[in-house]
Image (cartoon, rainbow, N blue to C red):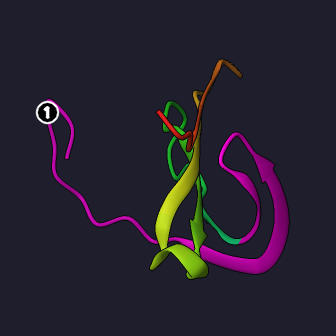
Amino acid sequence: ASSDELEMWAFEIGASEPMHLPIGPLDAIKLMRRPRRTFDTTVEVWLAPKMDYLPVRIRLTDSGGVTDSQLASKD
């Protein structure tokens, strides 16, 4: 949901990949939502099976290429 619409998102499921994060090394499965319209945001989420599939990394990239990335940490 956004401020002006509600829609279903479809994610592509990628392979498990090793990650080196502030919480330590672990394997995570990457999910990606590709933009469907001109100004949509690309959404990438990495889920860690050993952490009950909690998201350990989230990256949002807008249509202009501006990226916001968040990583799991111990804090």
Instruction: Give whichever of 59, 64 is nearer the camera.
Output: 59
Q: Where does residue 34 sit, x and y in percent of width and height?
A: 60, 55
The image quadrant of residue 19 is bottom right
Q: Is residue 22 above or below residue 67?
A: below
Instruction: Give whichever of 36, 30 is nearer the camera.
Output: 30
Q: Amino acid at mark 1?
A: Asp
Q: Residue at x 15, y 30 (%)?
A: 3
Q: Residue at x 59, y 80 (%)?
A: 50
Q: Is residue 62 above or below residue 12?
A: above
Q: Which residues are magenta?
A: 1-27
* Residue annotated with mark 1: 4
Residue 6 within the magenta-colored segment of the rendering: yes
The image quadrant of residue 22 is top right
Q: Where does residue 15 sit, x and y in percent of width and height?
A: 79, 81
Instruction: Give whichever of 20, 11 is nearer the camera.
Output: 20
Instruction: Give whichever of 75, 27 is nearer the camera.
Output: 75
Q: Few, some or many C-alpha atoms within 10 Å of disc 1 (few <14, some 14-19, many ≥20)?
A: few
67 sits to left or right of 52: right
Q: Residue at x 28, y 66 (%)?
A: 8
Residue 2 within the magenta-colored segment of the rendering: yes
